[in-house]
Amino acid sequence: MAIKGKKYQDSTKLVEKAKLYDANEAIALAVQTAKAKFDETIEVHVRLGVDSRHADQQVRGAIVLPNGTGKTVRVLAIAKGDKAEEAKAAGADYVGAEEYIEKIQKENWFDFDVIVTTPNMMGLLGRLGKVLGPKGLMPNPKAGTVTMDLGKAVKEAKAGKIEYRLDKTNIIHCPIGKASFGAEKLQENFDTLLGAIIKAKPAAAKGQYIKSCVVASTMGPGVKVNYTKL
């Protein structure tokens, strides 16, 4: 097993492993344990009492965090004509159609973070399902990235819109900002994310919905949140 660095070991001393902290305490601790030389991202990991193998128990959506993510988001808009102009005007970094599909296919080009497109272009993008899907880059109407309102989609992506979805182990992993935001702004982002996840509870979900919740900085230890109070 790899030996963790001194900063990590110092950080773990601040956190009681078995304790369930109130959300505000947990977030403040996660900020305190962010000791790296770069501005660490604060992440939330929520385990849900659902089974992601069943279509009626999927939890997926997208929200704009009130304070953004602190990350510069590069947006690729696959569009033509007026919609391409609309995406450009809204600040998309790359706008085009076949030429970008080809660039991704032939050059393995991924200098973007989000793809937005219109429904009529999904046939083109479908060819890239095998490469975009595993990277979580495939546009999706539920996430608001397949829409006729491309201007809004570009602006939201730039403003810090994040997508949340279950992984195979029924856990949602999401960034809620940078350590430099401070606990108050991170708390606002946390509340917005958790509110959306709770609202998205599938009707088919039985028993306890939130099984566990952990916040952590990129390089720091996990801090357990008292999920019974969420």
Image (cartoon, rainbow, N blue to C red):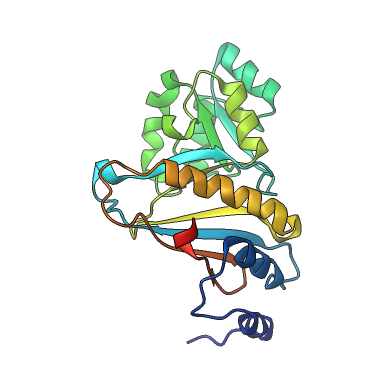
153 to the left or right of 196:
right
x and y, in percent, of residue 25 in the image: 63, 66
User: For the view shown, which residue lies furthest in the front direction?
Assistant: 229
Residue under the point 48% across and 79% down: 18
Q: Is residue 180 left or right of residue 163?
A: right
Specify whether residue 12 is in view.
Answer: yes
Up-down relation of residue 13 to residue 84 (above or below): below
Residue 40 lies in quadrant: bottom right
Viewer-proximal residue among 140 and 106: 140
Seen at 40% across and 37% down, the residue is: 128
Q: Residue at image x 47%, y 87%?
A: 1
Q: Position of residue 103 (x, y in %)?
A: 53, 36
Please count the marks in the image.
0
Residue 157 placement: quadrant: top right
Q: Residue at x 74, y 55 (%)?
A: 181
Instruction: Give percent across and percent down for residue 132.
Output: 43, 42
Q: Is residue 181 left or right of residue 107?
A: right
* Closest to the observer, 101 or 215: 215
Outermost residue to the top? 82
Location of residue 126 in the rendering, given as x and y in whole percent from the top left corner? 37, 31
- Position of 154 relative to 27 (above/below): above
139 shown above or below 165? above
Is residue 217 among the parts visible in the rendering? Answer: no
